[in-house]
Image (cartoon, grey):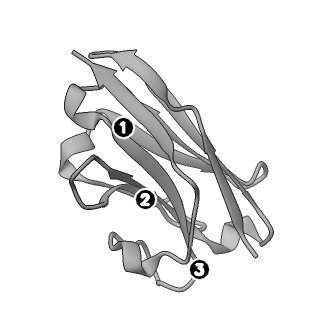
Amino acid sequence: QVQLVESGGGLVQAGGSLRLSCAVSGRIFSGYAMGWFRQAPGKEREFVAGVSRTYYTTDYADFVKGRFTISRDNAKNTVYMQMNSLKPEDTAVYYCAADRRTPGLARTSESYDCWGQGTQVTVSS
C-alpha cells in the first residue's frame, strides 16, 4: 500500500516562497504520476500541478503558472513543489496524490488512487 507524507507547509507573507515535499513509500514510485491539489475553506479541492511517471511532463493550473514548479526525484521517491510569489489566495491545505492508472497526466481528483494527509499553507497579506 502506498503511503504519502507531505511536509513544508507553513505561514509566509505575500510574495514569499515555500517548498512542499511529498515522500512516497510502499510501491515503485516511478510507476505513479504525481499531483498536487489544494482545498481552501468552503471550496472544492482543485488541481494545482502534476508530473508524469517517466518523461517528466508537467501540467499546471492557470492560477499558478509561472509561480509554482513541480518536480520529482525517483531516486528519493519524492515529489516537490516550489511555490514562489505566493498570494493570500494561495492559502489552503495542499495535498499530494499518486495515480497509477491513468495514461499521461490527469487533473481530476478521481483519477488519483492515494492521497497524503495534507499540509497547511497560509499566506498573509
The residue shown at (27%, 16%) is 14
Percent across and percent down for residue 97 are 52, 63
Image mark for residue 50: 2
Give the residue drawn at x 57%, y 32%. Answer: 8
Residue type, numbered disc 2? Gly
Tell me whether the residue at label 1 lies in contact with that at label 2, contact meaning CB atoms closer than 8 angstroms.
no
Q: What is the x, y in percent for residue 69?
A: 42, 40
Q: How many numbered callouts?
A: 3
Q: Residue at x 54, y 86 (%)?
A: 101
Residue position marked by numbered label 3 in the rendering: 100
Residue 85 visible (yes or no): no
Q: Is residue 22 above or below residue 100?
A: above
Q: Amino acid at mark 3?
A: Arg
Residue farthest to the front, as pictured:
42
Residue 103 sits above or below residue 50 on the image: below
Q: Earlier in the sequence, mark 1 or mark 2?
A: 2
Q: Is residue 30 left or right of residue 55?
A: right
- The answer to whether residue 3 shows anywhere in this view is yes
Q: Residue at x 31, y 60 (%)?
A: 45
| Residue assigned mark 1 | 68
